[in-house]
Image (spheres, rainbow, N blue to C red):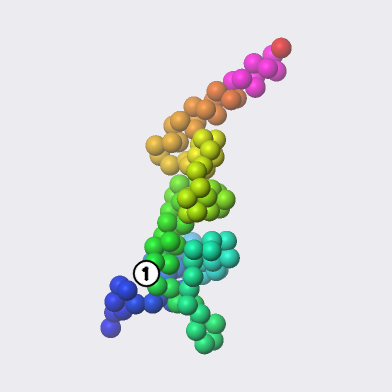
Amino acid sequence: MNKSDNAYKSIGEVAKILNLVNKKTGNLNTHTIRFWEKEFKQIKPKIFAGKRRYYDESSILILKKIHFLLKERGMTINGVKKLLNNKPLKLDEVLNNSISGDNLKLKNKLKKILDLTKELKNLK
């Protein structure tokens, strides 16, 4: 029997959805979700008897965004907080936080330019 898509899901089910699996042991990294709960006020699981957490679809969508921005885009927690709170990021924050395939070339070029300017300063 499968749960419907809008049913509450346990923390283990959410960890599977997000593919939060320890590569060495194969265990689910549910502690990551609990940590994100403390960091991001947008995540509001229902906590029932026995302190078991259950997540609705909106919380799971927020967790998917957080997972994507942190793990795929390489952003910092503070950068993700600003995005989720609709605060604008400064240009240097975008460059430092986003290392996706599109921005990786640009970031590498900027790093090379920075390294070259440091070398030139050292030659003086």
From the viewer's perspective, is residue 50 above or below residue 41? below
Q: Do we see residue 21 in this rendering?
A: no
Q: Position of residue 89 (x, y in %)?
A: 51, 42
On the rendered image, what quadrant is the C terminus found in? top right
SS type, badge 1: helix
Find residue 19 and report its image quarter: bottom left
Residue hosting label 1? 57
Identify which residue, 49 or 32, lies in the foreground: 49
Q: Three-letter amino acid code at disc 1?
A: Glu
Find residue 17 and report its image quarter: bottom left
Identify which residue, 50 or 118, lies in the foreground: 50
Magenta span: helix, strand or loop, mainly? helix
Left or right, residue 39 beside residue 9: right
From the viewer's perspective, is residue 117 above or below residue 12? above
Q: Is 84 one of the magenta-colored residues? A: no
Q: Position of residue 80 (x, y in %)?
A: 51, 51
Residue range in magenta is 116-123
